[in-house]
């Protein structure tokens, strides 16, 4: 895709305008023609969109004083989207929607109350084992290590997975979201992620899979999350 060339009027661009979408890869800005897909999305994608629409509606129901509380709390939360500047922060709306989405992902969808963002602990995740339960559900066991966390039971692992043939590369559009069955129990613990109908999701029935994974932590008290990490590994059944 062509690179965006900065000029006197605009040093950087992001998001979409008209028929053009700007995006960043490795700190470089590119542009492409804006997509207009006819396919409405998978069932899980439409459910995620429904949650987002409810989050937007919930924000509109807040009184101005509560919205201002969220705005003040967001002043110290640095954005992880362009422009990548230390003094660039998110909005109260962003912080509210993040909390709403996190609670929904934890199976506890409700209206979040204003809470300051606290840095989540550094997390490392590694593959342990896998098996098939109840005929068509993949049980994925992952080891989670938290860096000097005083309250590990506050956090739960969330992952986005793609299963493919061994040696095949990652395709972000094929990642699907899942959450560990329980919160962490210690700074070094095992968690289980269940993937119902895993063969049908990726249309593969193999004895060995290449697994591409993004993982992060969800804070069960605030709904907030940290930045995801990537990991790939081979999995045998």
Image: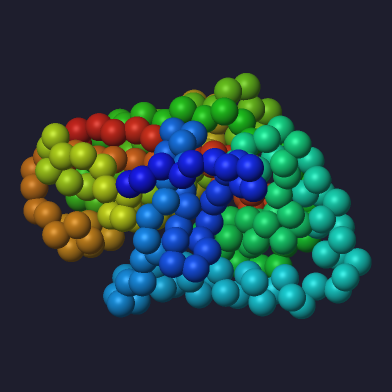
Horizontal and vertical percent position of residue 203: 14, 59
Q: Is residue 144 above or below residue 204?
A: above
User: Is residue 28 shown to the viewer in this render?
Assistant: yes
The one nearer the camera, 29 or 141, is: 29
Image location (x, y in percent) of residue 160: 38, 48
Please say which color scheme the image uses: rainbow
Instruction: Please determine whether, in this image, residue 182 is positioned above or below residue 152.
Output: below
Of 141 and 118, the residue lying toward us: 118
Relative to 162, is 45 on the left or the right? right
Between 95 and 89, the one lying in front of the other is 89
Q: Residue at x 61, y 47 (%)?
A: 10
Furthest residue toward right: 65
Could you tell whether 125 is left or right of 200 in the image? right
Quadrant of the image occupied by residue 45 = bottom left
Q: Is residue 232 left or right of residue 28?
A: left
User: Which quarter of the image is occupied by the C terminus?
Assistant: top left
Q: Identify the residue at image location x=65%, y=61%.
A: 97
Q: Closest to the observer: 190 or 79?
A: 79
User: Above or below — where is 169 with respect to 134?
Assistant: above
Residue 212 at what x, y percent from top left? 29, 40
């Amino acid at each position: 895709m062509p690179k965006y060339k900065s000029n006197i009027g605009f040093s950087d661009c992001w998001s979409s305008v008209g028929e053009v979408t700007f995006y960043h890869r490795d700190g470089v800005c590119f542009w492409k023609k804006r997509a207009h897909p006819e396919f409405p999305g998978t069932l899980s994608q439409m459910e995620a969109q429904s949650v987002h629409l409810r989050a937007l509606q919930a924000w509109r129901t807040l009184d101005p004083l509560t919205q201002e509380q969220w705005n003040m709390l967001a002043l110290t939360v640095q954005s992880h989207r362009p422009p990548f500047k230390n003094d660039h922060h998110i909005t109260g709306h962003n912080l509210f929607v993040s909390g709403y989405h996190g609670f929904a992902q934890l199976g506890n969808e409700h209206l979040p109350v204003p809470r300051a963002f606290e840095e989540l602990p550094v997390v490392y995740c590694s593959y342990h084992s896998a098996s098939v339960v109840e005929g068509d559900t993949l049980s994925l066991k992952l080891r989670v290590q938290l860096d000097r966390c005083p309250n590990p039971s506050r956090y739960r692992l969330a992952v986005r997975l793609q299963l493919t043939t061994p040696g095949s590369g990652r395709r972000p559009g094929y990642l699907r979201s899942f959450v560990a069955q329980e919160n962490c129990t210690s700074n070094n613990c095992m968690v289980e992620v269940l993937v119902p109908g895993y063969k049908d999701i990726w249309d593969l029935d193999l004895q060995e899979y290449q697994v591409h994974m993004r993982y992060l932590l969800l804070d069960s008290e605030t709904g907030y999350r940290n930045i995801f990490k990537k990991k790939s590994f081979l999995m045998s059944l």
